[in-house]
Amino acid sequence: MPCEISDKSVAEVKIVSKKRAGIINPMYDCQPAGAQYAGIGVKDSIPLVHGGQGCTMFVRLLFAQHFKENFDIASTSLHEESAVFGGTRRVEEGVMVLARRYPDLRIIPIITTCSTEVIGDDIEGSINVCERALKKEFPDRQIYLAPVHTPSFKGSQVSGYDECVKSMIKTVAKKGAPTGKLNVFPGWVNPGDITQLKYYLSEMGVDATLFMDTEDFDSPMMPDKSIQTHGRTTIEDLQDSANAKATLALARYEGAAAAAYLEEAHNVPNHQINTPYGIKNTDDMLRKISEITGKPIPDSLVRERGIALDAMADLAHMFFANKKVAIFGHADLVLGLAQFCLEVELEPVLLLIGDDQGSKYKKDPRIEELKNSVHFDMEIVHNADLWDLERRIKKGEIKLDLIMGHSKGRYIAIDANIPMVRVGFPTFDRAGLYRKPTIGYKGAMELAEMTANAMFAHMEYTKDREWILNTW
Amino acid sequence: MPMVLLNCDKDIPERQKHIYLKAPNESTREFLPIANAATIPGTLSERGCAFCGAKLVIGGVLKDTIQMIHGPIGCAYDTWHTKRYPTDNGHFNMKYVWSTDMKESHVVFGGEKRLEKSINEAFDEMPEIKRMIVYTTCPTALIGDDIKAVSKKVMSERPEVDIFTVECPGFAGVSQSKGHHVLNIGWINEKVDTLEKEITSEYTMNFIGDFNIQGDTQLLQTYWDKLGIQVVSHFTGNGTYDDLRCMQQAKLNVVNCARSSGYIANELKKRYGIPRLDIDSWGFSYMEEGVRKICAFFGIEERGEQLIAEERAKWKPKLDWYKERLKGKKMAIWTGGPRLWHWTKSVENDLGIEVVAMSSKFGHEEDFEKVIARGREGTYYIDDGNELEFFEIIDLVKPDVIFTGPRVGELVKKMHIPYINGHGYHNGPYMGFEGFVNLARDTYNAIYNPLRHLAAVDIREGAVDSNLLFREAV
């Protein structure tokens, strides 16, 4: 790389909205998809999606693509007559069929879609009808029915996830004896991240509940052929969320609404922090946990931090410095990755975040922090689609050394011959990424190494100074 | 008792009418499973929606056409990166999807302006593309946006572009099948016979109901080239929008997938007198029969025999190697509909495999007539099977391999049963002679995978014979 010295003393961070009305290659799925992801995070839960069959079938396929697992999600199979006369009867039938055929079922999040919101089906009314019918037919069982209003013409999978977590908490949380536990809302992360978080909590001796605990979304093939693919957060966990000592919300757009609700309705103090991507954000998280619980940060985590720094130091100023990066995906992920990039001397020049929450993003303290800390020009596009990235590359408006994002953007990297690190959701074109942490010290290290390896492979395929690695 | 009530269905006894166990000497008509009927809510059915039947299965295959989906973002997102239909122009069809990204204000005030803007933007952003299909979705159909009027307006302002509209919201019909029908009939009504192309052979046909899954269309095209037959249009594998406007020019319609595309063949016969010839493109014996029928129609039987002889010489020994090792293995097929009757006899004749259970997502009763006629006795025939039924059927028939979608494949993996992607294939193409050897190879590799036998071993129980099936050099 030729020596480039920026002649500008002040770097600019520009926040713009996508200029086109339509979308070419979306970054996100719609609200009901995100709600389904939250809904499967609870044990003995089968979400019931009130809409056309495609709204469920494709989302189940999407989860299967990402996790290489099957998840149970039901549909009310809305048809014409419901579109004309209303579909609440199909909700009621769906609930009863699920209750009868799945004896272990304990919660059904009822997730609306664009069609049933336009029709105006009264979900709360249906729930009342169902609760009476369930009580009569199954007097010894309690099956919670959570109304999740997620019209597809609002927000995105991100807000749908947030809405469903909140609705399940709202439906099940019940004031009782204090548990002394910590509620943790990790946001839309991978099983590998959940494992990592649990490790930190256990090393610190903190008794915590994760909403949602998706560790078993990476599930085994067992000799007894049992199927263990399900959320680990239980109904009891949801009930006791109201009785925790405090709440720690790790994502601003994914689960934060539930955390705020618990504070408002049940006086559980809520601590909103930055999603722990990178070293500093992880430091802040561990300090915050220590502050809330009074538990010290143990030596083991100081050591893990050191291992991560040691590995990242081998890469940063030799390979990453001055490299221009575009990042796309969920806002919590993208802003967190941008912070991580700065730590390892990568230059995230373009951030693409989605859906229609522009004004909300402007208040995000991470953006303020980026404004104060970057030494290069950065563009943040909200309500963005993937064409915003592809067009800039094709028109030569931007020169990139790396793309970070999920698999839906794979062809941008393939066609423009730019190395790409798969991160976020979904990552179906790489094996096993759901198992790898991206948060915490270990996650930062894994991300840095994955980035370096993507660059190294690219150097080899393009015969671009690949000999450097002869002696590295 | 030929219609079967499974244990898991005791609370939804109407499912009995959808599951048939073939017994000797029965009139299959008497016991035909009910099909193409509404799904019971909450059953965890495998079905998709009518919109995806139109967009994902047929329209979205075209290699030169913008797919503009008028609705919220999910309908576009969900019907993108879920299919394996490459093209010879760099897979334009798989790389992009377009949406009007409808928001609440458009539900309230109408979304036509948004659609018009999105259409114009799409053409502006990709000026080399001049063709488009616009689809309605559930909410835009409910609020009554007139997508046809908007498309006409754009076409009058941009004379170089052509737009086709499909009004098929997800809630229409009972499955994706409805979408196939709407697109078929819309296309013949509005676009066929609006263009003529150069005819270069006296033998011309449309090849209908083949979507170039992993290159099926391109493989079969090598046969038509050898036979000197000009394919006027492919409906729609590796196809172009404009070729499909010329369907009226062909002398013969050859139909592979009768379920998704039989409608347009029937209409072409009715309106233009073009005969319809149905063939099966999977399997040696079927493919030979298909080539013979087509060649007989054109009076070029000798060319056909020569092609068959060449292909057999090249591929039959390989097929037989696999047949030797697959003989007597048990297969289940849980796919859309027609592949049940395309495959059951071909895997039996060509590979000695026994198909022991079949479930169709969107087949009609005529599909069941065909599959039951071709299928084995003692085999289960299921309409719109759901998850608990699958578990029970697996227990009853104990298949060695299941041809189904990737998600169900992940489910049955836990039960140590390998799956083959029955929709997008593992490593296809699977059509034609070479293709069926690919299918045989993938099936062999699945069944002879050591991992599923290792999965059955409980290491706490000490060393036992793990029953590994040993692979051999091909």
Image (cartoon, coloured by chain):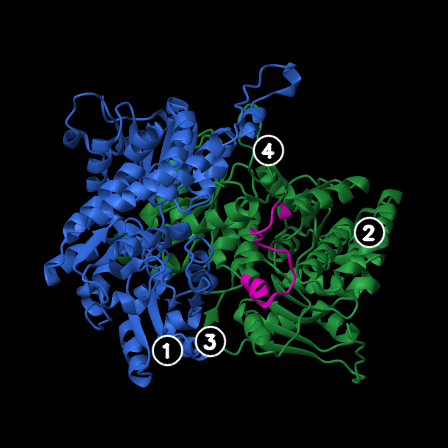
Residue furthest to the right in view is: A299
Contact between labelled residues 2 and 1, with CB atoms less than 8 Å apart: no
Q: How much space separates mark 4 and mark 3, taking CA atoms?
A: 44 Å
Which numbered disc, 4 or 2, marks the residue that appears first in the sequence? 4
Q: Nearer the viewer, residue A46 or A442?
A: A442
- Residue at x 81% of width, y 42% of height: A204
Label 4 – label 1 distance at C-alpha: 50 Å
Q: Picture coordinates of residue B52 (x, y %)? A: 36, 55
Q: Amino acid at mark 4?
A: Pro
Drawn side of residue A125 relative to residue B205, left or right: right
Q: Nearer the viewer, mark 1 or mark 2?
A: 2
What's the residue at 30%, 83% (across, down)?
A: B159
Q: Give chain B's shade.
A: blue
What's the CA distance linking mark 4 and mark 2?
29 Å
Q: Which residue is mark 2?
A: A308
Mark 2, residues whose alpha carbon is within 10 Å: few (<14), some, or many (≥20)? many
State the green chain: A
Q: Which residue is mark 4?
A: A220
Mark 3 lies on residue: A21
Tag 3, which chain?
A
Q: CA distance from mark 1 to mark 2?
A: 52 Å
Snapshot quadrant of residue B62:
bottom left
Per the model, the C-alpha gap separating discs 1 and 3 is 10 Å
To the question of a shared chain for discs 1 and 2, the answer is: no
| Chain to which the residue tagged by mark 2 belongs | A
